[in-house]
Image (cartoon, rainbow, N blue to C red):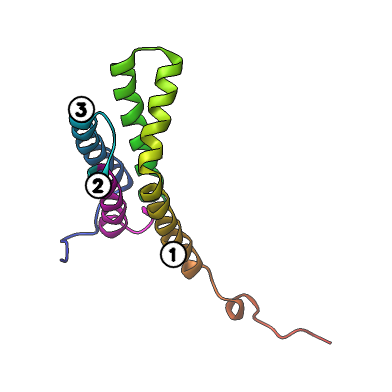
Amino acid sequence: MKLQGPGLKKQGVVVLQSFFIFFFGSIELILRSGSGILTAVVLCAVLYGGIRFGRAGTTYVSVVTPPIAFAATVLFHVLLKDGFAISKVGIDFIASLASIAPYLLASAIYGWFVYFNEKAKSRPGKSAVRTTSPQL
């Protein structure tokens, strides 16, 4: 599917990723009282969507936003549910992050691979750096 125009700016990527993670994560946290496969699939999908539909130079933002948005969503819901009881908040927060950890890790590996691959391709090669042969 080809989009018209150059794609999403950094701000657009952050807003859309955060919205989808908050929306689907909230639904799952409210209905199941924990994170699960729906949130995991959404995390992977928004990472891919941010890389695919973002402009050139938005890959870093696309990779960094999903884990932060998910952590903020979970923390928000845990604070609403448990109040400010530090021990309950800590346990529920870590449990929610742990339930999604394999998907976060897989999407992070893929995202950082794409980012560093893109960065390496934009760097000039060794032959372009050396313009003259070394003098012996």
Drawn side of residue 55 relative to residue 108, left or right: left
- Residue identified by numbered label 2: 42
Q: Residue at x 61, y 77 (%)?
A: 126
Pointer 1 local density, CA inside 10 Å: few below 14, some 14–19, many at least 20:
some
Instruction: State which region is magenta.
Output: 39-59
Q: Which residue is mark 1?
A: 118
- Residue 9, image x and y in percent? 29, 49
C-alpha span from label 2 to label 1:
24 Å
Q: Nearer the viewer, residue 133 or 94?
A: 94
Q: Earlier in the sequence, mark 3 or mark 2?
A: 3
Q: Is residue 18 above or below residue 131?
A: above
Question: Which residue is identified by label 3?
Answer: 30
Q: For numbered disc 1, what is the local secondary structure?
A: helix
Disc 2 is placed on an element classified as helix
Comparing 57 with 31, the one in front is 31
Q: Earlier in the sequence, mark 2 or mark 1?
A: 2
Asked if the stretch drawn in magenta spans residue 58, the answer is yes
User: What is the magenta segment's predominant secondary structure?
Assistant: helix
Cβ atoms at labels 2 and 1 below 8 Å apart: no
In the rendering, at what x and y percent does residue 1 appear? 15, 66
Q: Residue at x 26, y 52 (%)?
A: 45
Mark 3: few/some/many CA within 10 Å (<14, 14-19, 20+): few
